Amino acid sequence: MLNDAGSESIEEPSHNEPELGVSTNCDNDTATDKRDEVKEYRSKNAVVVHEVTGLHTENSEQTELAKENSDEQLGSKAQVTNMTLLAPRPSNVQQTGLNENLLIDLLLKTLHVNGACSIRKLVDYLALSGGVIQELIELGKSKSLIENTSRNLEGEIRFEVSHLGAAQAEKAMVKSGYLGKAPVPLSQYQKICRAQSNRTEPITHQEFNEAFSDVVFPEEMIEKVGPALNSSKPILIYGLPGTGKSFFCRQLNRIFGDDVLIPHAIEVNNEIIQVFDPEIHQVNEEVVNTQALLKLEIGHDPRWIKCQRPLVITGGELSLEMLETRFDPNSKTYRAPLQVKANNGILLLDDLGRQKISPKELFNRWIIPLEERRDFLSLQSGLHFEVPFELLMLFSTNLDPNELIDDAFLRRLGYKIPFAPMEISQYQQIWLQTCKDLDLQCKETCFEYLIDKLHKRHNKAYLPCYPRDLLTIIHDQVAFKKLPNEVTEPLLDFAWQSYFV
């Protein structure tokens, strides 16, 4: 049997397990027989499942061994299954949740720009199943907008726009210049975005330590930051430059560790807003080579992309316009604002207080989203619509928080966490680890020289940025002069004088 993408399909094995329910007035032998029947059924189906996943085993011991050796693979398949349930593939136009006229216009624009295409090619262009594409083509043919043309080298029928279809495609381009994957309806985006919230599972002390096992953090800092990550309120991190604020925020996605679905675009009142941004969203789709997975049509709606939880960082360049839906009058396309691109991830506003807008204006814009976890945007037509605000909001500043914003806004921030210089022991850990990373040797006497003759003499705090910066200068000098890969006192003096003014 052929599926809607033109590939051969096979039927899934039956999963009608015999019922174990036994009447209260039956005898023990009947109950035992029933349990044996269920056990035999489960044993047989275990082999079927493992055959499908490529993990065929002959007995229970081998099954357990295979399971232990493939935890990561099975975990990945489990997530694929969850995403399939969350965003199932639509098999017809109605199941896409979109207006058929919007899809017809998108199809016509695609054919008009790319020329004659086969159904398989259109599936790639629009991220819709072959069945949906075929239904749209038939609709287009019935309106004399689409017609058949010659076959390609693979013998596949190709389609192109008629003169009437070309005229409608050009008319549609004037209204909306969007070309690409089909969007998802706003209602579906709202539902899936909330289902993928990073607040659904609390973060524990153990998970924090495991995620940052290779990063030096003071224990008192962990005690403050850890609980803050479980809060629904934003977090303000402040302290001297170089104390690791920005570095810490950039590493937070380690803790969540899972993937989420990001739509290519969303549809609002027949307008298409592009959400996916390749500079922000790191695609994590597996390359599936198992033919069985294709035949069983395992996978989520391809209008959604499996990505790492996004991390969006903005600093002094932030303006209020970047927090609203932006319409480009030249390309006739809409772009989603930063907070929508950051949904289900982290939004870091670095260098708070150095933006073109005042902190007060910024917080006034975000009062409702921060408290109600929803935001209100608008289209060029003036239509307002609601989107989820499901993200971890972080503010970072080198300035005194009391000088930036008043007490009312500080209360709304929830957690205010200071980042301070490190103790010597922690500073030494970072120093030695950086030496190892740069393939440099450093004797204990040289580190003592760094502390006693340089840090203490010049009254410099032990900031976590110094080891990397100073040792990089030493590494450059070693390479330039072809010196031994060893930190020496003269090299420390050179790096210190080069680094500090």
Image (cartoon, rainbow, N blue to C red):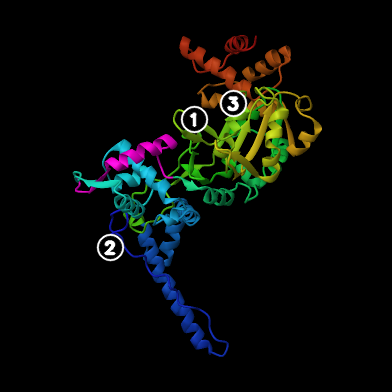
Going by the numbered disc 2, the residue's amino acid type is Met
Against 80, residue 25 (above or below) is below
Which residue in the structure is indicated by mark 1? 328
Q: Is residue 223 visible?
A: yes
Which region is colored magenta?
154-182
* Position in image of residue 40 (x %, y %): 42, 75
Tell which circle, 3 or 1, labels the residue nearer the N-terminal end.
1
Residue 432 bears which disc, if any? 3
Query: Do the residues bearing badges 1 and 2 touch, measured as CB atoms within 8 Å?
Result: no
Q: Residues within 10 Å of mark 1 (few under 14, many from 20)?
A: few
Give the label, 1 or 2, closer to the camera: 1
Query: For the residue labelled by badge 3, is the local secondary structure a helix, a strand or a loop?
Result: helix
**Does the magenta run of residues contain 102?**
no
Tell which circle, 1 or 2, labels the residue nearer the N-terminal end.
2
* Position in image of residue 175 (x %, y %): 44, 37
Q: On the picture, is 304 further left or further right than 6?
A: right
Task: Name the residue at 65% across, 37% down.
Answer: 393
Q: CA distance from mark 1 to mark 2?
A: 46 Å
**Does the magenta run of residues contain 166?**
yes
> Which image quarter: residue 240?
top right
